[in-house]
Amino acid sequence: MNKYASAALKAHHYLVVSKSMPPREAWATAVAEVTESESARKKGCPKITFLTLADCGYLKNIEARHEEKRRGKLHQRAILVANLILDFPAISKAELADKTCYRDRQGSYDIVIALAQKGLLQHPK
């Protein structure tokens, strides 16, 4: 499991345990635990992927907040990948790359796959 997938699982745990912790803080806390690299902590794709899933109701036991203002490519891709994984649980990273026309190099697919494998991903209600 890559560091961003580990961070996503930790951040989800923090959101469930501490209902008052906002998703951004949960992500920052979790990613700081899995890497000391400042540049790795600031990577946009993994962070936006996790925040989009949390914000839009894709994470089990996390209420959708709809607070994130961005609705750009990263946001759209996170939703597309989550829907593909939920609809086709056995989909591979290569198939995700084909369907999204994007080759993930920063671990965003790993985040969504790890959350799904742990039973923490859902279609929004």
Image (cartoon, grey):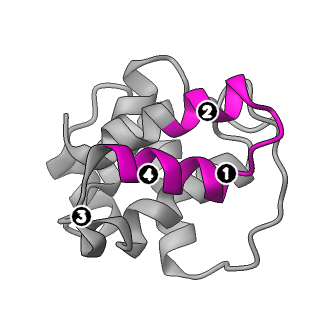
Q: How far apart are labels 3 and 2 at the CA level? A: 22 Å
Binning the other alpha carbons within 10 Å of mark 4 as few (below 14), some (14 to 19) or many (20 upward) gives: many
Nearer the observer, 120 or 19: 19
Return the disc, 3 or 4, that comes first in the chain's sequence: 4
**Dot 4 corresponds to which residue?**
81
The answer to which of marks 1 and 4 sits earlier in the sequence is 1
Badge 1: residue crowd in 10 Å (few <14, some 14–19, many ≥20): many
Residue 107 as seen in the image, left or right of residue 15: left
- Upstream in sequence: badge 1 or badge 2: 2
Given the image, on which type of amino acid does mark 2 rest? Tyr
Q: Are the residues tagged 2 and 4 within 8 Å (C-beta)?
A: no
Does residue 113 lie above or below 33 as drawn? above
Q: Which residue is mark 2?
A: 14
Helix, strand or loop for the magenta stretch, by majority:
helix
**Of the residues shown, which amino acid type is indicated by label 4?**
Val
- Measure how far apart labels 1 and 3 are at the Cα level: 19 Å
Q: Is residue 122 magenta?
A: no
Disc 1 versus disc 2: distance between alpha carbons? 9 Å
Q: Residue at x 75, y 44 (%)?
A: 21
Q: Residue at x 39, y 61 (%)?
A: 46
Stretch in magenta: 11-33
Residue that carries the numbered disc 1 in the rendered image = 23
Residue carrying label 3: 106
Residue 16, quarter of the rendered image? top right
